[in-house]
Image (cartoon, helix red, strand yellow):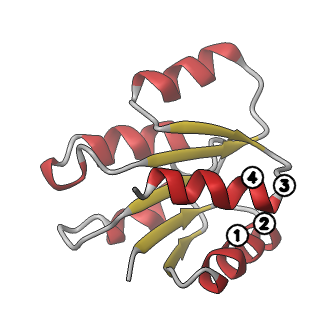
Amino acid sequence: MKRIVIVEDFNTSRQIIKKTLEKKGYKVEEASDGREALKFFDGSPVDLLITDYNMPNMDGAALIEYVRAKNEYKYIPILMLSTETNISKQNRARDAKITAWIRKPFAVDEFTKIIEKALR
């Protein structure tokens, strides 16, 4: 079973994403910000990271930089799910080597297609 970590500070969004992924048969771990998510990157397998950009304590770009610095997670797919429109912030996320940027709000069908493609 594929393990996906979702990092999103808005609880309603996090629950929608979690339920959508669990219906598809994925094991879902969740965190409300980047700092809380660090516990999932302890060397145990993670197949996909989905993170928001703007969050308290540690933003999505800082989380991605942390994850990518660890050998075990250097090549896992990472999806940035955000409303962020600031080009320099988008570039920072891309420089941290995200797999794809998904703009909120998203269509569930399109979202699940991107997930399935990222996990291939």
Amino acid type, mark 2: Ser
Task: Name the amino acid type tagged 4.
Answer: Glu
| Residues at marks 3 and 4 touching, judged by CB atoms closer than 8 Å | yes
Q: List the residue tagged with mark 3.
A: 107
Residue designated by label 4: 110
Query: In the image, which is nearer the foreground, mark 2 or mark 4?
Result: 4
Q: Residues within 10 Å of mark 1 (few under 14, many from 20)?
A: some
| Label at residue 13 | 2
N-term-proximal mark, 3 vs 2: 2
Image quadrant holding the N terminus, namely: bottom left
Is disc 2 placed on a helix, strand or loop?
helix
Earlier-in-chain disc, 3 versus 1: 1
Counting residues from the N terminus, which is met first, the one under dot 2 or under dot 4?
A: 2
**Residue 32, percent across and down?**
61, 67
Q: Amino acid at mark 1?
A: Ile
- Residue 52: where, in percent of width, then height? 63, 49
Residue under pointer 1: 17
The percent position of residue 49, horizontal first and vertical second, equals: 46, 57
Task: Examine the image and state in which quarter residue 44 appears.
Answer: bottom left
| Contact between labelled residues 1 and 2, with CB atoms less than 8 Å apart | yes
